[in-house]
Image (cartoon, rainbow, N blue to C red):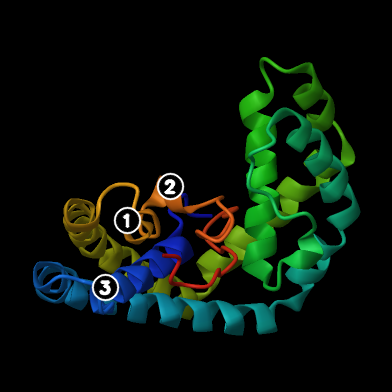
Amino acid sequence: MSSIDYARFALILQRCKEVADDQTATAQLRAAYHEGLSAAAEMYLSAHARVVEAEREFEQRNAHFAEALGALDGLYCSVRLVVKEHFPDAGLPPSLLDCPTLFEKAIAVETLLNILDDSLVDETWAAKEANAPFAKKAPLIVRELGEAVMRSGPLVVKLDERAVAYAPAFERHLVFKRAVRQACGPVSGQYQSIHWRVAWGKEGAGPVSWGPFSFRAPFRTW
């Protein structure tokens, strides 16, 4: 799975538009969006929407993957409780049943596995969990899912198109973010709602993300 949080970036771009179109926005701020970010953002959001649709079609054709991941829920919840004792801020959904799509389930599982892998050398609890049933069963399912995705021509094409659209949108988003910081201030709701590190994990300010498929929180938080 990709290390880029594409869905969260899509949400940030939507919030950028909301900030620019707000009645309190200055003329300079609106110009910074519509002359700088708007076109690249629309291209990215369109590409992302096509990926979401392609993923939905993939899931319909491969329902057994969702069933296999769902069967891990009890094991997942048990390991998650242990991880949260050591990493209370780790963004992990309480249950795989809370993840409505196949890929949200996969990202939650993979994120939990990555935390175990990263802690394996120095933490005895992680070594114990790495030898437990969850860590034995989950990697095989995730790997088989990844291989199936790579064999799915239509989905791979859409993923590649989104990856191409990401870079210019991200660069222009950084420029717009600086303009928002200058116009509204670093502690403003406008700035925090489009800031990757600040906006997430605060109640009312954004979704708690556990990977590229994040809970969609309401927009406007100022």
C-beta proximity under 8 Å, tags 1 and 2? yes
Mark 1 and mark 2: span between their CA atoms? Answer: 9 Å
- As drawn, the label of residue 148 is none
When asked about the image quadrant of residue 27, the answer is bottom left
Query: Are there few (<14), some (14-19), or many (20+) residues within 10 Å of tag 2?
Result: some
N-terminal-most mark, 3 or 1: 3
In the rendered image of this protein, does residue 195 appear above or below residue 100? above
Q: Amino acid at mark 1?
A: Tyr
> 175 or 101, which is in the foreground?
175
Q: Quadrant of residue 88?
A: top right
Q: Give x and y (percent) for residue 78.
A: 88, 43
The residue positioned 61% from the left and 67% from the top of the image is 148
- Residue 34 visible in image: yes
Callout 1: 10 Å neighbours few (<14), some, many (20+)?
many
Which residue was labeled with disc 3?
41
Q: Which residue is mark 1?
A: 191
> Are circles 3 and 1 on residues that touch, CB within 8 Å?
no
Please name the residue that numbered disc 2 is placed on. 198
Q: Label 2 amino acid? A: Val
Task: State the image coordinates of residue 174 (x, y, percent, origin top left).
Answer: 22, 54
| Rendering coords of residue 69 (x, y %) | 78, 61
Residue 137 in the figure: left or right of residue 51: right
Tell me, yes or no, whether the two marked residues, 2 and 3, touch with CB atoms within 8 Å. Answer: no
Q: Nearer the viewer, mark 2 or mark 3?
A: 2
- Looking at marks 1 and 2 on the same chain, the residue that comes earlier in the sequence is marked by 1
Q: Residue at x 43, y 53 (%)?
A: 4
Rendered position, 86 above or below 46: above
Amino acid found under the numbered disc labelled 3: Ala
Decide if residue 72 is in sight here.
no
- Image height of 33 relative to 208, above or below: below
